[in-house]
Amino acid sequence: LYYKQIDLGVADKLVSRPLLMYRAESLQLDHVPNDRSLLVEFVEATPMAGRAVVTVWDERHRLNIVLEQLPTYRFGDKLFVHFPMQPDAVFAGGQYEDVL
């Protein structure tokens, strides 16, 4: 399954029309791209429970990422979200599929 040329894993071979879930703690944020990264814009960061919840924007999708420290990014900064090799969960037809 691909999203904007990023290989999101083998989920499409295991279920039809999967919905992939990535925990906010599983995503990484950086200034440098890699082969599993998506260009985004920084929106905001909120301190929460000793960490930071960071919101970024990908054209029409909002993504939240949990970081250990509050970042110093500014609104509109261009960054890259790095996806892990596999999603944390796969859902098909509204039901959880234990396929990983």
Image (cartoon, rainbow, N blue to C red):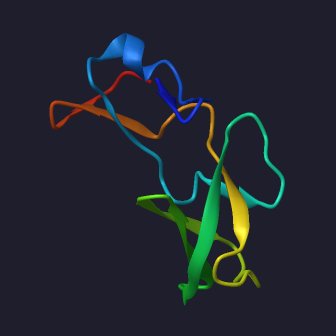
Looking at the image, which residue is at 59% across and 83% down? 45
Residue 63 screen position, x and y as percent: 48, 62
Looking at the image, which residue is at 46% across and 40% down? 88
The answer to whether residue 71 is above or below residue 79 is below
The answer to whether residue 75 is above or below residue 65 is below
Q: Residue furthest right?
A: 32
Name which quarter of the figure residue 67 lies in: bottom right
The answer to whether residue 32 is above or below residue 21 is below
Residue 59 screen position, x and y as percent: 49, 58
Name which quarter of the figure residue 43 lies in: bottom right
Left or right, 35 with reference to 46? right
Quadrant showing the C terminus: top left
Q: Residue furthest top?
A: 13
Left or right, 72 with reference to 4? right
Q: Nearer the viewer, residue 92 or 62?
A: 62
Q: Nearer the viewer, residue 4 or 47?
A: 4
Left or right, 22 with reference to 80? left
Q: How many marks?
A: 0
Looking at the image, which residue is at 55% across and 31% down? 86
Residue 35 screen position, x and y as percent: 74, 34
